[in-house]
Structure formats: C-alpha cells, structure tokens
Image: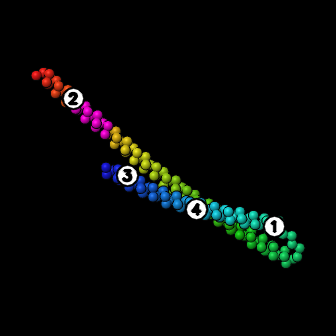
Amino acid sequence: MREKKNLEKLLNLTRHSEQVKTHELSQRLAAQKNATERLHQLTDYLSEYQTGSNLSKMPELQNQRSFTLQLTQAIDEQKQTTKQLEEQLKPSYKNWMMAKQRREAVEEAIADHAEELLENEDRQLQKDMETYAARNLKETLQKELE
C-alpha cells in the first residue's frame, strides 16, 4: 500500500512538471507566433508602401527612402527576434516531451504494479482454495477410513 502511495505522489509530481512545461511551451509558441505575424505585417507594409507611392519631388523621395530604410531595419530586427524565438522553442519542446514521457512511464509503472497486485491476489486465492480442498479431502478420507 505504501508503494502505491509513493507511486501516486510521483505521478502527481510528474503531472505537475508536465503542466509547467506545457505552459512554458505554449507561452513560447504564442510569442513566436506573434513575432512571425509582426514580421509579416512589416513586410506587407513595406511592400504596399513601395508599390503605392509615386513621388516626384526630391524631399518626398528622400523621406520615402529614409522611411523605407527604417522599415527595412525594423524588418531585419524582427527577423532576428523571430529566429531567436524559434530557437528558444526547441529546448522548450524537448523539455515538454521529456516531462510527458516521464509521466507516461510513471502511469505505466502504476498500471504494472496494479496488475502485479491482482496477479498476487489471484495466486493467493488459488493457493487458499487448493489448501481448503486438500484439507477437506483429507478430512473426508479420514472419516471414510474410520
């Protein structure tokens, strides 16, 4: 019985660990998704800005170039951010998978333990029935011999 309680405690710990890793992974996935969406927004905006502007005056052209340069720099920075977040996903995913596998292993150990207990009970019941039958047979034979 004590072993079962210890296994249940271990299962609770592994479940909690998996929940923590799941939460961490989901946060990183959300951050990576947001960064990717932001990158797409910036590149779409740059594309729209470049195709939609027909400037003829020199100051307007200089402003456009300056703005385009700043937007291109923002896109490059966002690409870096997105790449970093993708790299951070890998260990989080690996940690989550390990936590999940640990939990599954503990659940399997608990199931194996329960099956072993049932088999032991069945063996003990069979042994008790054989002992009872042997005792009854012995008593019956003794009565017949008397």
| Residue that appears at 28% across and 37% down | 124
Q: Amino acid at mark 3?
A: Leu
Question: Looking at the picture, how far across and down is residue 70, in whole percent?
Answer: 74, 72
In screen coordinates, is 57 left or right of 110? right
Identify which residue, 55 or 88, lies in the foreground: 55
> Does the segment drawn in magenta span residue 131?
yes
Q: Secondary structure at mark 4?
A: helix
**Mark found first going from the N terminus, 2 or 1:** 1
Asked whether the residues under the numbered discs 4 and 2 touch, taking CB atoms below 8 Å apart as contact, a structural biologist would say no
**Mark found first going from the N terminus, 1 or 4:** 4
Q: Secondary structure at mark 3?
A: helix
Residue under numbered circle 4: 28
Identify which residue, 85 or 14, lies in the foreground: 14
Between marks 4 and 2, how big is the CA–CA gap?
Answer: 68 Å
- Determine if residue 2 is in view: yes
| Residue that appears at 49% across and 58% down | 19
Residue under numbered circle 3: 7
Asked whether the residues under the numbered discs 3 and 2 touch, taking CB atoms below 8 Å apart as contact, a structural biologist would say no
- What is the count of numbered marks? 4
**Mark found first going from the N terminus, 1 or 3:** 3
User: Badge 1 local density, few (<14 within 10 Å), some, or many (20+)?
Assistant: few
- Determine if residue 88 is in view: no
